[in-house]
């Protein structure tokens, strides 16, 4: 299951129906923070959890999974043809450009991140899997756990993404970073909760 395409599909369906995350929470009984992680491809939802999401959106589970198992042997993404992907827009102004979007069922997710001058992510976040970063242009700060690392063009990192982390650009010029994400194959179970009246997030 490719987390990027799944998360984008769920978000698109929710927005298309004029629903907020809280609307989906009230209809599914799942937590708001967990649903946000699903939309931002940070966790792998279990099949029962997908069923709750599908029910809240008024669709079948099969429609959420449709086309996620396609696996062309070879894909070529020409310069400028990457797919811009939305992620954590409430806490980050980093632009994500997916470089492998034409192969949905993939083991890795390569992106080019554009970190605007004076921008980045406002708080550390963790997710499943492992990541590789290589700074292509400019300079960034990489916050990992309690540490802060200064990175320049040509520097690279490989790390466990379960430790909270973020990229920040304190400089006056935009920076670009190659990011390759490798997710876990074991899905995480969503923590459901008993619905209260009135429902809250």
Image (cartoon, rainbow, N blue to C red):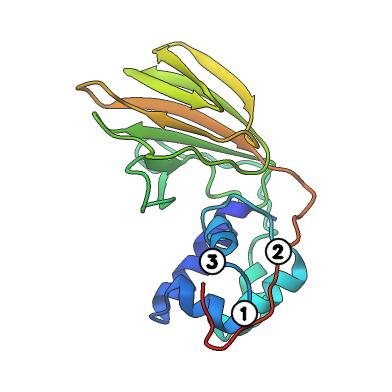
Name the secondary structure under disc 1: helix
Between residue 195 and residue 34, name the one nearer to us. 195
Name the residue that disc number 1 marks.
28
- The vertical placement of 115 against 26, above or below, is above
Residue at 50% across / 60% down in the picture? 8
- Compared with 152, 201 (above or below) is below
Q: Are marks 1 and 3 in contact (CB under 8 Å)?
A: no
* Residue 190 marker: 2
Position of residue 5 measured from the top left corner of the image (x, y, whole percent): 56, 57
> What residue is pinned by disc 3?
32
- Quote the CA–CA distance across marks 2 and 1: 11 Å
The location of residue 201, given as percent across then percent down, is: 51, 72
Q: Earlier in the sequence, mark 2 or mark 3?
A: 3
Residue 90 at x, y percent in the picture: 36, 53
Quarter of the view holding residue 49: bottom right
Identify the mark nearer the N-term, 2 or 1.
1
Q: Is residue 60 left or right of residue 58?
A: right
The single residue placed furthest to the right in the displayed view is 186
Which residue of the protein is positioned furthest toward the front in this rendering? 197
Query: Looking at the image, which residue is at 42% across and 82% down?
Result: 17
Kindly report the distance in space between the C-alpha atoms of the residues bearing marks 1 and 3. 10 Å
């Amino acid at each position: 299951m490719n987390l990027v395409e799944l998360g984008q599909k769920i978000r698109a369906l929710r927005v298309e129906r004029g629903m907020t995350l809280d609307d989906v929470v009230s209809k599914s009984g799942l937590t708001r923070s967990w649903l946000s992680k699903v939309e931002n491809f940070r966790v792998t939802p279990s099949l029962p959890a997908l069923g709750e999401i599908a029910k809240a959106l008024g669709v079948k589970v099969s429609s959420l999974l449709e086309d996620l198992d396609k696996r062309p042997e070879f894909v070529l993404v020409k310069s400028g043809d990457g797919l811009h992907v939305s992620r954590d827009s409430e806490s980050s102004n980093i632009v994500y450009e997916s470089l492998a979007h034409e192969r949905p069922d993939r083991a890795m997710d390569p992106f080019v991140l554009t970190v605007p001058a004076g921008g980045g992510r406002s708080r550390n976040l963790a997710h499943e899997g492992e990541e590789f970063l290589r700074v292509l242009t400019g300079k960034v700060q990489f916050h990992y756990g309690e540490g802060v690392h200064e990175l320049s063009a040509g520097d690279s990192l490989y790390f466990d993404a379960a430790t909270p982390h973020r990229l920040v650009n304190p400089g006056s010029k935009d920076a670009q970073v190659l990011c390759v994400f490798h997710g876990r194959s074991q899905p995480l179970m969503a923590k459901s909760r008993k619905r209260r009246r009135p429902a809250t997030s």
